[in-house]
Amino acid sequence: QVQLVESGGGLVQAGGSLRLSCAASGRTFSTIVLAWFRQAPGKQREFVATITSGGSTKYADFLEGRFTISRDSAKNTVFLQMNSLKPEDTAVYYCAAGALYSSTSNHYAYWGQGTQVTVSS
């Protein structure tokens, strides 16, 4: 079992930055793949970024280099640094953990409760 708790969401103006955190507990943090997904109102959940235990990363094409995923194994935490935020980035952001290095939500068995990010224009 893995428990995930996100934090760091909030309201920010377009062009601003936020850093999301996800604290993990339970199963060995160092061996799991971690990812961020998001879901906007009326839309399906979509992949944002993922990172392996070795630090390999994969990002959604629409990000255009604005977001960075990282992990701190000493703190059992994964981060999502979001820069140059746009109103269309408004969504609930979810942290997920699994065994596969994947952009598919079904490949992740564990999910956090989500944190709201709202970007005003």
Image: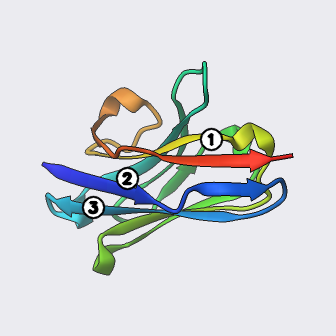
Q: Residue at x 54, y 21 (%)?
A: 44
Relative to 90, is 16 above or below? below
- Which residue occupies 43% across, 30% down? 104
| In the image: residue 33, left or right of residue 29 | right
User: As rendered, which of 48 and 16 lies closer to the eye?
Assistant: 16
Three-letter amino acid code at the position of disc 2: Leu
Q: CA distance from mark 2 to mark 3?
A: 10 Å
Q: Say what secondary structure mark 1 lies in.
A: loop
Instruction: Residue 81 in the image: state x and y as whole percent.
Output: 61, 64
Q: Residue at x 65, y 63 (%)?
A: 18
Using a 10 Å C-alpha cutoff, classify the residue at mark 1 as few (fewer than 14 neighbours), some (14 to 19) or many (20 or more): some
Upstream in the sequence, badge 2 or badge 1?
2
Read off the residue under disc 2.
34
Secondary structure at numbered mark 2: strand
Which is in the foreground here, disc 1 or disc 3?
Answer: 3
- CB atoms at circles 2 and 3 under 8 Å apart? yes
Give the residue type that dot 3 points to.
Ala
Q: Are marks 1 and 3 in contact (CB under 8 Å)?
A: no
Residue underneath mark 1 = 60
Whole-angstrom CA distance, mark 2 to mark 1, is: 14 Å
